[in-house]
Amino acid sequence: MPVSSGGGTLTLASVCGFSGALNYPSNNAPSGTSETLITQVPSPGSFPLAIPAGATYLMNVELALVSTAPTITFNPGFLALTINVPASIPTSGHHFYALACGPVTAGCSGSPVGPFALGVSGQKLTFSGIPAAFVAPISVYFEAQTYYTTP
């Protein structure tokens, strides 16, 4: 899918009852820049980022960018997510978080960002994205993984 320099919304593939969207902010992507978005509900231990002991993985979102530019700078809000959680996962009494990482080539080669607390409204989780401008190298992917804890 094309990446708009004005920002945009990408629909997450429905996987195991999860659905939602990834929003990306305005950026300096040249014409012809494209993206691939992958939604996963992998088995524990397959995420590149470590989560706290006792936490439960939810889902993972990967964004790959292809461009003629060596980097793209996104304004604050990169990897903003809205996730609809299946009813089989109770949201009451849990705390939900997102970790972001990029670039990812084999594990997290960049510094992880977060964790960020997710907003919770019924079965809907929201993450406003990385709060600072983000310079994204091309030909690698960026990842946001979500998990929850029970206090």
Image (tube, helix red, strand yellow):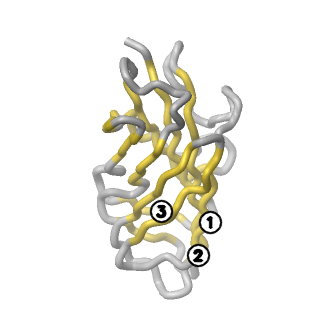
Task: Provide the secondary structure element on which disc 3 rests.
Answer: strand
Which disc number belongs to residue 69? none
Q: Please, what is the three-letter code of the amino acid marked with disc 3?
A: Ala
Placement of 102 over or under 25, stated as above or below: above
Front: mark 2 or 3: 2
Q: Which residue is mark 3?
A: 136
Measuring from the top left, give residue 32's x and y in whole percent.
55, 86
- Tell whether 11 sits left or right of 14: left
Q: Residues within 10 Å of mark 2 (few under 14, many from 20)?
A: few
Q: Quadrant of residue 97?
A: top left
Q: How many marks?
A: 3
- Tell whether 90 sits left or right of 39: left
Placement of 66 over or under 78, stated as above or below: below
Q: Which residue is mark 1?
A: 36
Placement of 59 over or under 131, stated as above or below: above
Task: Find the distance from the CA under tag 2 to the CA under tag 3.
Answer: 17 Å
Residue contact between numbered discs 1 and 2, judged by CB atoms under 8 Å: yes
Residue contact between numbered discs 2 and 3, judged by CB atoms under 8 Å: no
Task: Provide the secondary structure element on which disc 1 rests.
Answer: strand
Residue at image position (49%, 70%) is 71
Residue at image position (49%, 76%) is 3
Residue at image position (61%, 52%) is 14
Q: Residues within 10 Å of mark 1 (few under 14, many from 20)?
A: some
Q: Please, what is the three-letter code of the amino acid marked with disc 1?
A: Thr
Q: Which residue is mark 2?
A: 1
Task: Find the distance from the CA under tag 1 to the CA under tag 2.
Answer: 7 Å
Q: Quadrant of residue 59?
A: top right
